[in-house]
Amino acid sequence: MNEEIKNCRRCDLWKTRTNVVVGEGSLSADIMFIGEAPGYNEDKQGRPFVGKAGKILDELLNSVGLKREEIYITNILKCRPPGNRDPLPEEIKACTPYLDEQIEMIDPRKICTLGNFATDYILTSFGLKSENIGRIHGKIFKASETLDIIPLYHPAVAVYNPNMRPILIEDFKKIL
Ligand code: SF4
């Protein structure tokens, strides 16, 4: 599947990307983190969460004793929207079959969604009602007997608003 994603032209984002960011981590992870889309640094390096938001994500993971190698991290879009604009509905529709396959393959026990776009997509696809992340962050949704979905703020919110950091730290404790 990785080669297919790397050569993908299903939406127009292939025209402006430098690298496709498929995702990384353990393919047998119990916990999956799903963000929105690659940013500038991710597009340059072809890896998820390597910029400022990635640094905050690493700190948050550390705060609950999780290592990147034991989780799997990806995004709903695998290519960077120009200027980091919001994903378009047609881009989400074109790209999320890859994410669905990744979820099926990894078969996690917990999915942590980072921000509104990932939360909305994942809750809706598991037949659950989505709301703004401001209302449901840190709550645990039962998607099935064996799968919990935990919506979290996107770590990027703490880049420009340090007041969000303690809220993120509290929410991350719920993962365990
Ligand atoms: S964002 Fe997804 S659907 Fe669009 S070109 Fe990239 S991999 Fe393909």
Image: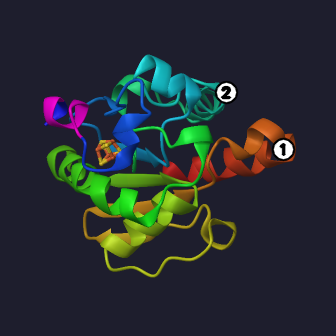
- The kind of secondary structure element at disc 2 is helix
Q: Amino acid at mark 2?
A: Lys
Q: Which residue is mark 2?
A: 52
Q: Quadrant of the N terminus?
A: top left
Lateral position of residue 82 relative to residue 26, left or right: right
- Identified at 55% across, 23% down, the residue is 41
Q: Nearer the viewer, residue 157 or 93?
A: 93
So how many labels did they put on this image?
Answer: 2
Asked if the residue at label 2 sits under 8 Å from ligand 1, the reply is no
Q: Are marks 2 and 1 in contact (CB under 8 Å)?
A: no
Residue where numbered disc 1 is placed: 161
Residue at 48 percent of width and 43 percent of height: 37
Q: Residues within 10 Å of mark 2 (few under 14, many from 20)?
A: some
Residue 93's label in the rendered image is none
Residue 4 among magenta residues? yes
Instruction: Name the residue: 57% across, 62% down.
Output: 116
Horizontal side, residue 134 vs residue 141: left or right: right
Instruction: Report the amino acid beneath label 1.
Output: Asn
Does residue 72 appear anywhere in the picture?
no
Which quadrant of the figure shows ligand 1? top left
* Residue 121 in the image, given as x and y percentages of width and height: 41, 66
Left or right relative to 151: residue 167:
right
Which residue appears at 38% of the width and 36% of the height? 15
Instruction: Give percent across and percent down for residue 84.
Output: 60, 42
The stretch of residues the image draws in magenta is: 3-8
Based on the displayed image, in which of its 4 quarters is residue 55 positioned? Answer: top right
Q: Main secondary structure of the magenta part?
A: helix
